[in-house]
Image (cartoon, coloured by chain):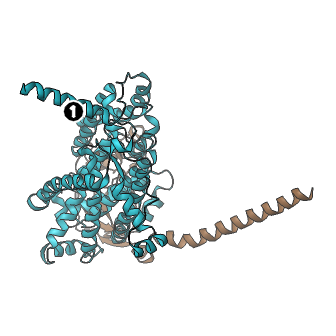
Chain colours: A cyan, B brown
Amino acid sequence: MNDHNYVPSSKLGKWFNDRLPLLSLSAHLSEYPTPKNLNYWWTFGGILTFCLLGQIITGIVLAMHYVAQADLAFESVEHIMRDVNYGWLIRYFHANGSSMFFLAVYIHIFRSLYYGSYKSPREVIWIIGMIIYFLMMMTAFMGYVLPWGQMSFWAATVITNLFSAVPFMGESITNWLWGGFGVDSPTLTRFYALHYLFPFLILGLVILHIWALHIPGNNNPVGIDVKKPSKDTVPFHPYIVIKDLFALLVFLILFAFFVFYAPNLLGHADNYIEANPLVTPNHIVPEWYLLPFYAILRSIPDKLLGVVAMFASIFVLVILPWLDTSKIRSALFRPLYRQFYWILVLDALILGYMGALPPEGIYLLIARVATAYYFIHFLVILPVLGFKEKTIPLPLSISEPVLNESSDVVKNNKMSTE
Amino acid sequence: MSDQKKTKRRDFLYTVSYTVGAVGIGAAVWPLIDQMNPDRSVKALASTEVDISSVEPGKSITVLWRGKPVFIKRRTQEEITEARAVKLDDLIDPEKDEDRAKNPEWLVMIGVCTHLGCVPLGNKGEYNGWFCPCHGSHYDTSGRIRKGPAPQNMEIPKYEFVSSNIIKIG
């Protein structure tokens, strides 16, 4: 990052840059040295930036037609779908965009877990990322309430009632959140205001996230530091930019499939029934991306402890850099961690699946075991593993394994041609 | 000695300034927080009157009060006997049926599950009372929690019989 000595070539550029060094910033961003061994799992940062901007742009457009008032909200969404020019497209993009956003963020988080990107010196990047993730969940939840269908209303009721578990103050807190004695129009209007605000907070945190990333630079699949920038890195532009764009295009194929061919697949039919405070739908489930947390909430038979466990499941992620005692970042060199990693992935998927099923009998038992394992992974296995595990020796540099491999390939090719 | 005294005076000034500042900021922030509490128009809907003359024994009606459903159930003799026969030791949230239904024939309660606020379904569950489909809480014929994650019995609102056919809730 030797870009302090960047000097714009034009006189005007120099004049401006001396007063506000935006050109230095853009030079830094394009020259930013990036480990040359990054794989496609590293393209999700760019994809996530696209998702955030896509949600903000379509969201602002939807806000021009939506009415955040209990008597009108449901109708105004139907008005967007039927009357507004391209309203269906913009709304389907926004609604499915949230699912795509979470899909990308989960891949991004699990990539960090696999390659140890949360470890020193990148703890602050990780923590900011977790705050972004938490804000994303709150934003998505409040956005889900806005269409004011049955699932919207009951999701709002169940989630705000989590706060009624707070000892002594529970009722005052829920009444304060609702602006009434139950979820009603005041609740809808304030959720709308916050749903509009939070994406901009996320945007600000994304800038901090990238800023914090640019101090130590990217982690990489082998998880060792860059030794020689000239050998181990490539400039961000054009190499990473083009690669990220290609990955984004592939991601957009999936995105477009949902928007154009299965726009309601990830939604719930009950949300096309207007909110009715007198009738709870028979089976209420949150959106798929919140299901693992919902399973944790329901697997604890006590109301307060269930809520505590749900928030704790996010909090253990925040303190993960200090729970994982291993100095080796990448799972490629941690044979045991690699296995536990995949068990955790499976555990998260099981929790998600159990969150969608009714909490009875065998499902409840499985959810409880999976919940227990989730906490054991972070609170027991990871701290112990750092001391017990016999790791594989690290390569000397980022280039070494690549260069050795390619020389092997060259030899093999020679042999085959002979 | 004078040195120390000066330091103390300055400390005092700091403390006073911080305190006054904190009180000022608190006073300025409070309206911004309190505006979210239930407003006058919401509170004005505090009571509602319901005509119950058409409710048959064994049936119930649901009315909206303060945005929440209120169940008004005309219980059969069987249901009353069942509710009154339960021992208090068997209850999660011990409460006598006599205290919940002053007039045993009529059970008036807020139809909101005390777990996470769903509306339980009537004549369902293992105790012939109500069953909450969201997270599986079972209530008996007195609306008391018997099984499941809900911590409390369904709440009894303040109500009175204005005449033999009209109940005023709130």
Residue B125: which quarter of the image? top left
Q: Nearer the viewer, residue A392 or A200?
A: A392
| Chain of the residue under the numbered disc 1 shown in the image | A
Residue at 33% across, 28% down: A333
Is residue A286 visible from the viewing direction of this image?
no
- Please state which amino acid type lies under the numbered disc 1: Ser
* Farthest residue, direction left: A417
* Farthest residue, direction right: B1
Q: Nearer the viewer, residue A153 or A114?
A: A114
Please state the horizontal and vertical placement of residue B128, each as a whole percent of the image.
25, 46
Q: Nearer the viewer, residue A107 or B149?
A: A107
Residue at 44% across, 74% down: A16
Residue A17: which quarter of the image? bottom left
Is residue A18 visible from the viewing direction of this image?
yes
Please state the horizontal and vertical placement of residue A288, each as a whole percent of the image.
23, 50
Please state the horizontal and vertical placement of residue A175, each as a whole percent of the image.
43, 64
Residue at 36% across, 41% down: B86
* Above or below: residue A51 compared with residue B39: above
Residue B89: which quarter of the image? top left
Dot 1: element: helix
Please state the horizontal and vertical placement of residue A147, each as a whole percent of the image.
24, 67
Q: Is residue B156 left or right of residue B77?
A: right
**What is the count of numbered marks?**
1
The residue labelled by disc 1 is: A406
Q: Nearer the viewer, residue A179 or A243?
A: A243
